Image: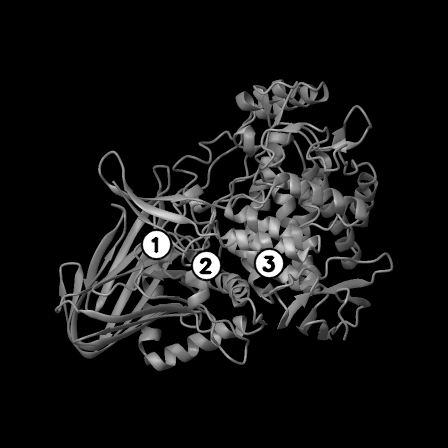
Amino acid sequence: MKRIVPFVLLLIALSSCRCTGRDSKGLEIAFRSPATMWEESLPLGNGIIGAMPYGGIDYERVILNEESMWSGSVQETDNPEALKWLPLIRQKLLEGDNLAAQELMHKHFRCGGKGGSSPQYGSYQTLGQLGIRRISESIDTLGYSRKLSLDDATCYVEINSTTVQESREYFSSIADEVIVTSITDTKPQDFSLRYDRPSRIKETATEGNDLILKGTLNSGTDAPGVSFYSRTRVITDGKIHPRGDSLIVKGARHILILTGAQTDYNHEKDSIESSVCKTLNHAASKSFKTLKERHLKAFREYFDRVSLVIPDDPLSALYMQYGRYLAICSGAHSTLPPNLQGIWSDSEIAPWNGDYHLNINIQMNYWPIETGALGDLTTPLENYVKMLSESGAKTAASFYNAPGWCAHVLANAWGFTAPEDPSWGATNTGGAWVCLQLWEHYLYSLDKDFLARVYPMMQGAAEYMQSQLFEEPVHGWLVTGPSTSPENGFYMNGNDDDICYICMGPVMDTQICSELFKAVIQASEILDFDQEFAESLKQTLSKLPPMQIAKDGYLQEWLEDYREMDIHHRHVSHLFGLFPGTSIQSPELMEAAKITLNRRGDGATGWSRAWKTCLWARLRDGERTYKLFKSLLEPAYSFYEEDLQGRQRVNYTGGGTFPNFLCSHPPFQIDGNFGGSAAIMEMLLQSHEVKEDGTRVIRLLPAIPSLWKSGSYTGLKARGRITVDCSWDGNKIKYRIDNPENLKIEVIIPEGMYE
């Protein structure tokens, strides 16, 4: 039995979303009914605690998250046997016997621990849910509205009935580090409140006017894992009394609910209860009005830095700002960077463990940060890469006998950096790529103190990559290997049965090496440090393979022009150099990139559509960029179905966007939201090009579609600490550029426009 729930997302969005500029608020995602599933609930967060209220009428559930709710623990991943087989694996690659190399990798060159699918690897998981049940008479609903205001970072619910009108507000305060829920009724109401979570690993209790939820997660070993503690305080004009592990509220016209949470991931176990209580006491000493004012001030300090108005297409403006909203909610004051689900999950085991994939996904989470004027949210990534560099140094030494550090595809809260299944887990440029994201922050901020802090990580990643290069036999180019072009395979020997992934010199590896080496050379010059190593990188750069264009005009994905296993593969790894990289700029390579994208096709998972939108924006094709962006907005359908045991579960099908505007892989992955937001910024402003004389090129409106006949933005950032405001109407453009460093720049406006 299936109950189909189709979502005509674009119709909902266009009818319920209003988009205006900074001076006239109105960025909203609105519904006319409560959420029936998680993909309709609305995300709130302060970087530490997340919440997703459903807006139920007689029963409200608020899904709760805490950024460090990670099971698992640090693994010993060294494999003493792996290094012994590395010379033979490379020999097989040099002989052209990739299948033999791949078989050796399967047998001998994998994580020496329990790996990424084990309980010890762990998973990000939900903290639980706060249930609020109306125990007075059920109300007959005459009118209902539910909305998320991006301007306020607040969810509002209005319920009108024949007997009572109820107003609710929910927000997760950056200022006070609590989730705040306010319920106001025109007549006294009775409610019960209770914690729950989908696990036996929990203990619930009441204490005075507080609910308590605590427990210890599975470490995957005999040792205890992460301990968590959450406490909810109820303040009301009604009467409160406990009943088991619930609080009963009687005769209340107003209820203020404050929820705090913490784990001992980054704190002493004995301190988390007292810390949460202290946080709640501080919050409870303030009125709701004061809490709301403090919340708005702290949130808007981030959000109001950028405005975007597109009168003919408010949905695109909303989507860009939604990406910025999610970045603030999952990254402000956090310890860890946003994972595959940001900080939002409703399950005990998140999809893909809610971890940090290093072959694009964690990097994509940061794509809108810099241009979107949120560069100060980079700190969690900086700290995380430092942790990876420490564990990755062991991985580099154990598996490759190499200096520096490396990371492969999987990474978690415990610093996992080891290789996994060769078909996808042998890519070892994860550390190098994520270091380039740190370099991007420097290019935008010109913060030398930051650069000095991250230089050892960048240098270590470059040192590792340099040490792994060896000469291929045809041209004498220096190539990586064993490696893969992320998650895509190719056919060997013209045989459709001989699918191979392992290779030497995949194009993405070369592009990443080239861009990282150049970044380290520049950083060395800026810091006046480590010139000898920088000089060695210059020597290595000259020996890397050039990008090669196949006879059919597309950019080759591998060193040889293999026939790919999936011509429409979701990863377009060989176009890293177009976006987010900068090494594809010549007319010949740009044309080859265009042919590559046409060959790959537009259909894909949600995050892949976002990446392709960014790629077309870099090609400065506004119509095709917008076509890809619209494909990202295609409704992702969900439906309930019964499994063989008769249990209800949610099934997902189709990449695109869920009703709450979260991106569907499927299922939910937040990187698609961030990638889509970054793509719109790339349509409006690009600053990645630098001329030979050092002039920074600023392109205004490089990829806007014809639909966007007029519009304006303020506060977007360009590399070099530059801030850009721009407005356009037909073929007339106005702009203002703040260039505090007085850098040499060249501003390019679209052909046919004039100032």
Q: Earlier in the sequence, mark 1 or mark 2?
A: 2
Q: Quadrant of the C terminus?
A: bottom right
Q: Which residue is mark 2?
A: 10
Residue at image location 16% in from the left, 76% down from the top: 163
Vertical placement of residue 117 versus 715, above or below? above
Contact between labelled residues 1 and 3, with CB atoms less than 8 Å apart: no
- Depicted 5 relative to depicted 735: above or below: above
Residue shown at the point (13%, 59%) measured from the top left: 244
Mark 1 touches mark 2? (CB < 8 Å): no
Residue 318 rendering spot, x and y as whole percentages: 51, 66
Q: Position of residue 210 (x, y in %)?
A: 23, 66
Instruction: Give the foreground label among 1 and 2.
Output: 2
Residue 437 visible in image: no
Amino acid type of the residue tagged 3 in the rendering: Ala
Left or right side of 35 for 112: right
Q: Which badge, 3 or 2, comes first in the chain's sequence? A: 2
Closest to the observer: 185 or 376? Answer: 185
Q: Amino acid at mark 2?
A: Leu
What is the CA distance from the residue labelled 3 to the residue labelled 1? 25 Å
Q: Quadrant of residue 548?
A: top right
Q: What residue is disc 3 on? A: 678
Identify the secondary structure beneath mark 1.
helix
Nearest the viewer among 578 and 512 is 578
Where residue 736 sits, quadrant-wise, is bottom right
Measure the C-alpha gap from mark 1 to mark 2: 19 Å
> What residue is pinned by disc 1?
38
